Amino acid sequence: MKLNPGLQSVPMFLLAVTIEILATLLIAGCIQAYFIDLRTLAESPEAPDLDTFNFFSRAILESAIQSTASSGNTSPTAVIDSASSTIFLLGGISTFASLGAFLMLIFNFKNQADIERE
């Protein structure tokens, strides 16, 4: 028993909706991390209080600190640049995932002629 006769596959529909939700949450986290947390960090780079950042921003900044420390450049500007590059990468991935999920939703629906034949 299908939920909607226009759906070709209910699992594919649920997968596409799940991907869309996760991509939306990821892009929201990227926007919040870039426009709020990185600007706060840029205003006071000497003594950042990472405890005030959310989990997503903290994970990105800790990753940026580790990657810049491994390269030998520990300046605050390098950390901010590395964090913003990570944010843009994750934002791009979530945009393409959202586009893919949207295409999955479009191609999961049958056209009206196929529904009438059944």
Image (spheres, rainbow, N blue to C red):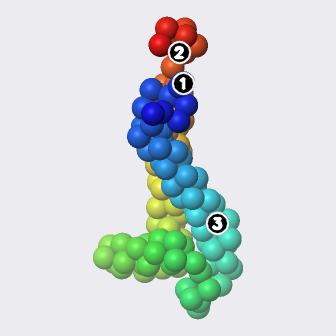
Whichever of labels 3 and 1 marks the residue nearer the N terminus, that label is 1
Kind of residue at disc 1: Gly
Check disc 1 and report the residue beneath it.
6
- Residues under labels 1 and 2: Cα distance? 7 Å
Find the distance from the CA under tag 3 to the CA under tag 1.
37 Å
Q: Residue at x 68, y 71 (%)?
A: 36
Q: Amino acid at mark 2?
A: Ile
User: Which comes before the other along the chain, label 2 or label 3?
Assistant: 3
Q: Which mark is residue 27?
A: none
Residue at (41% x, 40% y) in the render: 11
Say which of 53 and 82 sits in front.
53
Q: Residue at the front extreme?
A: 1
Give percent across and percent down for residue 85.
Answer: 49, 59
The alpha-carbon separation of the residues under discs 2 and 3 comes to: 43 Å
Q: Amino acid at mark 3?
A: Gln
Does residue 53 lie above or below 31 as drawn?
A: below
Q: Nearer the viewer, mark 3 or mark 1?
A: 1
Disc 2 to disc 3: CB gap under 8 Å: no
Which residue is labeled 3 in the image?
Answer: 32
Query: Is the C-beta separation of discs 1 and 2 under 8 Å?
Result: yes
Of the numbered discs 1 and 2, the one sitting upstream in the chain is: 1
Dot 2, how many residues are within 10 Å of its Cα: few (below 14), some (14-19), or many (20+)? few
**Secondary-structure class at tag 1:** loop
The reply to whether residue 85 is in sight is no
Q: Position of residue 26 (x, y in %)?
A: 53, 58
Image height of 32 relative to 107, above or below: below
Percent coordinates x, y for residue 7 in the rendering: 50, 28
Left or right relative to 68: residue 31:
right
- State whether residue 97 is above or below residue 71: above
Residue topped by disc 2: 115
